[in-house]
Image (cartoon, helix red, strand yellow):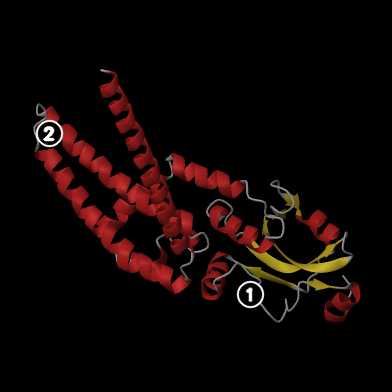
Amino acid sequence: MFKKQAKRNSINVDLFNLKSILNKRMYALQQKENERFRALGRDEFRNFLINQCVPKIKTLTQKLEQLSSEKKKTKTHNSQKRNKLKEGIEKVFTDTNKLIELIYHFYPIYRKDVIPNLGKELEARFSEKEMRFFHEAFIRFKKTDSYKNILETEESQNYLGKCFESAYTFMIKNNSILQNMLLIQGWVYNLELDKYMSHAWNEHNNFVYDRTETKEPIPIKEYYKTKKIGTKGTLKYFYDDAISFGNKSGHYGPWDTQLFDKELLTNDEFQQRFGNI
């Protein structure tokens, strides 16, 4: 009896060790796959969307249509079959959510104008029915914990030293709410350094949004006075322009390499370029 018990314990330990080894290997493979996704360039990302995501969405749309049609034909008293079809429909949306999460999580600079509107290039490849399905799936995805976790992670990021990224992402996220918002790239005075530095922020209705400073809007006059910002040495971008420059360059800015040929300017250098404020 004790021998049998010892044998069972030995088998359980072996199974536990095997499961632990498999989990570690799966994690390592997943991490390797994640790094591969992060390493994709803009053109590779575009190819991934067109050659893999688009066909997958088309297949999922067809599957959803088939299941929904079959569910309508199934009589109400046949609850077992209807429940099975319902589970199949939910699985279609679950699979789509995984696809959206993959794009949303691993391609931060490119997903901004791809997910909400699908992008003009992607939109042209979908039928009206496929577009409706994708948008419904995206609405569902926004209610998931995965989406909330991604947003919380982004909001908790320290944007200090990442002003161009901050201004770009803020515009993408809030453009539909703060319509006609501007993304500004310009020179601002840094009191600690006693120099002017290249910087980026957002403006809307006489308020500045600068997440490197605070999450609260700042009156534009107060901001301009503190930062010694003049009419010269700044560039203003509306949403479409910012998206265009971001996609073409593959980065958040600055996009004018002549205006921003260096990160810092002394007071004398600033005055030589732009004159007194």
Tell me, for residue 43, which label it has, or none: none
Residue 81 badge: 2
Residue 145, position in %: x, y?
45, 39
Mark 1 / mark 2, whichever is N-terminal: 2
Specify whether 36 is left or right of 218.
left
Instruction: Please state which amino acid type lies under the numbered disc 2.
Output: Lys
Callout in the foreground (1, 2): 2
The picture places residue 180, in percent across and down from the top left corner, at 59, 60
In this picture, residue 225 sits left or right of residue 116: right
Where, by quadrant of the figure, is residue 141 drawn?
top left
Q: Residue at 82% across / 61% down in the picture?
A: 227
How far apart are the alpha carbons under marks 1 and 2? 58 Å
Q: Which residue is drawn at 66% across and 77% down?
A: 256
Direction from residue 110 to residue 166 in the image, left or right: right
Give the SS element for disc 1.
loop
Q: Is mark 2 on a helix, strand or loop?
A: helix
Q: Which mark is residue 255?
A: 1
Q: What's the residue at 85%, 59% (across, down)?
A: 225
Q: Report the amino acid beneath label 1.
A: Trp
Task: Residue 22: give x, y in percent of width and height.
Answer: 36, 46
Residue 127 is situated, as x and y percent measured from the top left of the image, at 26, 62
Q: In this view, does 58 lie above or below 155?
A: below
Residue 127 shows in this picture: no
Assign the N terminus to one quadrant of the image.
top left
Asked if one can make out residue 27 in the rendered structure from this viewpoint, the answer is yes
